[in-house]
Image (tube, helix red, strand yellow):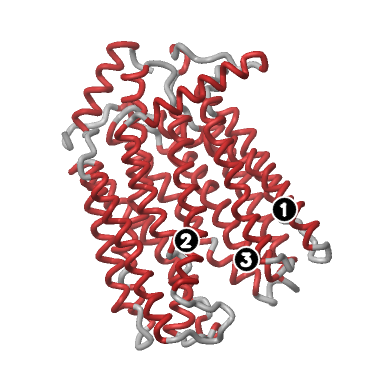
């Protein structure tokens, strides 16, 4: 099947791929900037650590509710601009404006005032971001119906999107540098404006240039009016129930949760290992090494790993590409025990290419496979197609993993006796920290391989489903 060429009608033009990739750059820039800026709630605006933690967690509960609703709404929308693009356009504008306003905090205000301002603006920002992100993900699932072109599209978009993770580690360096800004608060406010302008411009591109399936012949869509709101809620729960019953989809969600959550739990550990193990507690000596470590990892994922994974998926199938990539990441994580050494800082970069196969392949393959799952859902449950609902549920799992990782990461640090206020850490603590940094992602990656081992939606099955659908309702 790998030698079957993609029909011209199923290929996504380069311009549309670039526009879709720009949207994914925005999807990564926002959470990346939020993650790095949150540090300055403590140092620049004097926020109580507990309140800062609430600001990181409470909006996620709100996000978990709005995502499925937005997915359902975009699935059932009828407009001359398509089901997704109007929301992407409006959401892109709204989220850019509210992101800038979110960070216009005044360090002279009381901690309580800044807490409530930030919490309320976070909710408003998330409404705009959900309007942008959920339809964008759904649009990607329907831009092509070809099994391999879906992987190429997701590979392209993930490559562009990963550029955000090359950029955002340097926000901390720039904001904290007195040569750039007189104080950190000014730096946060100013950098937020730059991020907002970039996301505003990039976010409009998929709304203007990308094209999804022709929705003119999509039947059974629900009427979205204020009078039908209660029946819509019932239909929403039915759609979610149908998605949860989709076994291949649940395998994708489970594997994603494990790989992503395993990585996120220990995401900050490398920074602490650099500071306290390699440089013996000297932040000055540590300098920008952690930023370089993160940026190079993102570059390797974008320009080395993703192209290789895309070729692997075409040649051996998406499931096998995932299994091989995840196994390689396990080898990379294990290598950190020898590579992270005070004797030679450059050794710490050796595991990066193998480690990058984990996250570098994850969203490229899983988003491509989720598009295949949407075809299976239509075959089993009929119209309307539910790309928005599946996309919302999939990313809800990702966000749930992020939220749990924040809690579990802190719990692990507490259990091993890590003291963030101490100038140095004990030998026992550092040994446990290095073990946890390796064991946690290795175990979760291994469990993900086990879950995906019997994933059944192969290329042959996907092509058969596509043929059945086109025979039933024609080509969309």
Picture residue at 28% right of the left edge, 53% below the top: 447
Badge number at residue 127 = none
Vertical relation: 465 (above or below) 90:
above
Residue 354: image x %, image y %? Answer: 29, 63
Name the mark nearer the viewer: 2 or 1: 2
Q: CA distance from mark 2 to mark 3?
A: 18 Å
Residue 378: image x %, image y %? Answer: 36, 20
Is mark 2 in CB contact (under 8 Å) with mark 3?
no
Mark 2 vs mark 1: which is more N-terminal? Answer: 1
User: Which SS class for mark 2?
Assistant: helix
Q: Residues within 10 Å of mark 2 (few under 14, many from 20)?
A: some
Mark 1 vs mark 3: which is more N-terminal? Answer: 3
Picture residue at 32% right of the left edge, 63% below the top: 355
User: Which SS class for mark 3?
Assistant: helix
Mark 2 vs mark 3: which is more N-terminal? Answer: 3
Vertical relation: 298 (above or below) 471:
below
Q: Residues within 10 Å of mark 3 (few under 14, many from 20)?
A: some
Farthest residue to the front: give it: 415
Badge number at residue 39 = 3
Q: Quadrant of the C terminus?
A: top left
**Mark 1 lies on residue:** 118
Whether residue 80 is visible to the viewer of this picture, yes or no, is no
Badge number at residue 408 = 2
Q: CA distance from mark 2 to mark 1?
A: 24 Å
Picture residue at 69% right of the left edge, 63% below the top: 188
Q: CA distance from mark 1 to mark 3?
A: 14 Å
Q: Residues within 10 Å of mark 1 (few under 14, many from 20)?
A: many
Q: Quadrant of the N terminus?
A: top left
| Residue 3 appears left or right of 198 | left
């Amino acid at each position: 099947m790998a030698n079957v060429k993609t029909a011209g009608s199923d290929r996504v033009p380069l311009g549309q791929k670039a526009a879709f990739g720009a949207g994914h750059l925005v999807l990564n820039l926002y959470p990346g900037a939020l993650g790095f800026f949150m540090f300055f709630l403590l140092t620049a605006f004097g926020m109580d650590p507990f309140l800062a933690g609430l600001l990181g967690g409470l909006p996620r509960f709100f996000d978990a509710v709005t995502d499925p609703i937005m997915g359902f709404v975009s699935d059932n929308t009828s407009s001359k601009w398509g089901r997704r693009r109007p929301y992407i356009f409006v959401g892109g504008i709204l989220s850019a404006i509210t992101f800038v306003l979110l960070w216009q905090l005044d360090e002279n205000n009381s901690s309580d005032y800044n807490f409530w301002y930030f919490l309320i603006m976070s909710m408003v920002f998330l409404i705009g971001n959900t309007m942008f992100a959920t339809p964008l993900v759904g649009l990607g699932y329907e831009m092509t119906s070809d099994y391999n072109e879906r992987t190429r599209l997701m590979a392209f978009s993930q490559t562009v999107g990963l550029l955000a993770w090359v950029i955002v580690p340097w926000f901390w360096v720039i904001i904290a540098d007195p040569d750039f800004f007189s104080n950190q608060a000014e730096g946060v406010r100013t950098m937020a404006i730059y991020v907002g302008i970039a996301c505003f411009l990039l976010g409009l591109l998929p709304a203007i240039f990308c094209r999804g399936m022709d929705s003119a012949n999509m039947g059974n869509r629900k009427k979205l009016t204020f009078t039908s709101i209660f029946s819509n809620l019932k239909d929403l729960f039915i759609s979610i129930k149908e998605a949860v019953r989709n076994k291949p989809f649940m395998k994708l969600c489970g594997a994603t949760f494990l790989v992503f959550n395993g990585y996120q739990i220990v995401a900050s550990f490398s920074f602490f290992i650099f500071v306290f193990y390699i440089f013996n507690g000297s932040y000055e000596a540590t300098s920008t090494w952690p930023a370089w470590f993160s940026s190079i990892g993102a570059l390797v994922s974008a320009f080395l790993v993703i192209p290789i994974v895309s070729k692997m998926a075409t040649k051996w199938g998406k499931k096998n590409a995932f299994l091989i990539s995840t196994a390689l990441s396990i080898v990379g994580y294990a290598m950190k025990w020898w590579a992270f050494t005070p004797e030679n800082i450059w050794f710490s970069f050796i595991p990066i290419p193998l480690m990058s196969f984990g996250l570098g392949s994850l969203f490229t393959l899983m988003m491509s496979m989720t598009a295949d799952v949407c075809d299976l859902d239509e075959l089993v449950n009929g119209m309307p197609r539910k790309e928005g609902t599946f996309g919302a549920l999939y990313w809800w799992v990702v966000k749930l993993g992020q939220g749990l990782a924040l809690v579990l990461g802190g719990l692990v640090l507490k259990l091993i006796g890590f003291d963030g206020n101490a100038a140095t850490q004990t030998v026992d603590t550092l040994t446990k920290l290095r073990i946890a940094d390796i064991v946690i992602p290795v175990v979760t990656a291994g469990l993900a391989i086990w879950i995906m081992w019997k994933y059944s939606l192969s290329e042959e099955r996907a092509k058969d489903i596509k043929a059945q659908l086109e025979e039933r309702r024609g080509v969309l």
